[in-house]
Amino acid sequence: MENNLETKNNQQVINSLKLVISPLKKMEAIKFNYEELKGGLQESLKKYQNLVYTSQNIKEAKDDRATLNALKKSLNDEKIKIKKEFEVPYKDFEDKIKELIELVDKPASEIDKQVKIFEEAEKVKKRESIENIYAENIGSYADLIPLQQIYDSRWENKTYKETDIKKEIQDIVKKADSDIKVIAELKSEFEFQIKDTYFRTLDLGQALVEKQRLEKQKELLTTIKQQQVEVKVDSINNIDSVDSVRYAVGIDNSNEESTSVEEKMISVAFRVECTESQLKALGEFMKANGIKYGRA
């Protein structure tokens, strides 16, 4: 109790310390023979307007340049001199203020370290509470919706109530129940893949897009297989041997001697119109079936 009172009194003392600056005298404008110099320069420099030097008077050009540069240097030197004189009192003031700030900064830095350690300990404690809330409410989705997938860093804030965290997790579970029911009612042959997409994204829309993609891919593969059969039939029509025809179409005549005929390789050029994903599926199908292909 005494320590708290002492700390409070010390804070009041520190708060009462204010920087008090004595009223500064209004600085007068720096007076110098500005008008005289300006008038003299304007008059003297008229000589150099549109002046062209030649090889005969190049020495005069060099002398003029030296004269003008010397005047420019003398003016600039005076400016720097006056500026330094004005900066002397400010530099003294600045150094003293920096010294005072360093006195304050040392204990403030030490206190900040301790506060951050305490705040981190509070966050660790809050994370443990979040893990417990998750475990108590996630139900059968523990393996399908891991905590890190739905984790919101704002939950760690001291002002974020645990009841609100609980409700958010419960809402995620309710939504998952509803979305999975929708997927099941589709009775799709790709239900497993659709659910996999859903639990990776927790987005029913993306899951339905995946369903459409798989259905289009199947449709394309079916079309390719049908085209393959048609090509095979066309090749059979070009075979002269009846026995070879029977072999190619798979006719089993038990009353005749079986003839071992090696299937003939054919080359067919055809055009395909499809989407990029369908073209990719077509390529995968031909690779899987050992079909060689390339650009015509």
Image: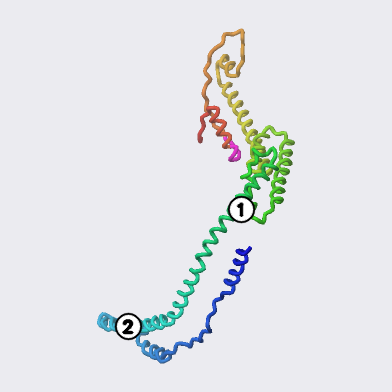
- State the quadrant of the N terminus: bottom right
Question: What residue do we see at 70% from left, 48% from top?
Answer: 166
Question: What residue do we see at 35% from left, 87% from top?
Answer: 47
Q: Nearer the viewer, residue 20 or 201?
A: 20
| Residue 234: quarter of image | top right
Q: Is residue 228 left or right of residue 133?
A: left
4 versus 22 height, above or below: above
Give SS at disc 2: helix
What range of the chain is rendered magenta? 271-278
172 versus 266 height, above or below: below
Q: Is 272 part of what is drawn in magenta? A: yes
Q: Amino acid at mark 1?
A: Glu
Q: Amino acid at mark 2?
A: Ala
Task: Determine which residue is flagged by label 1.
Answer: 122
Percent across and percent down for residue 110 are: 52, 61
Q: Mark 2 packing: few (<14 Cα in 10 Å), some, or many (20+)?
A: few
Question: What residue do we see at 49% from left, 86% from top?
Answer: 27
Give SS at disc 1: helix
Percent across and percent down for residue 230 are: 61, 26
Give me the C-alpha separation between circle 1 and circle 2. 70 Å
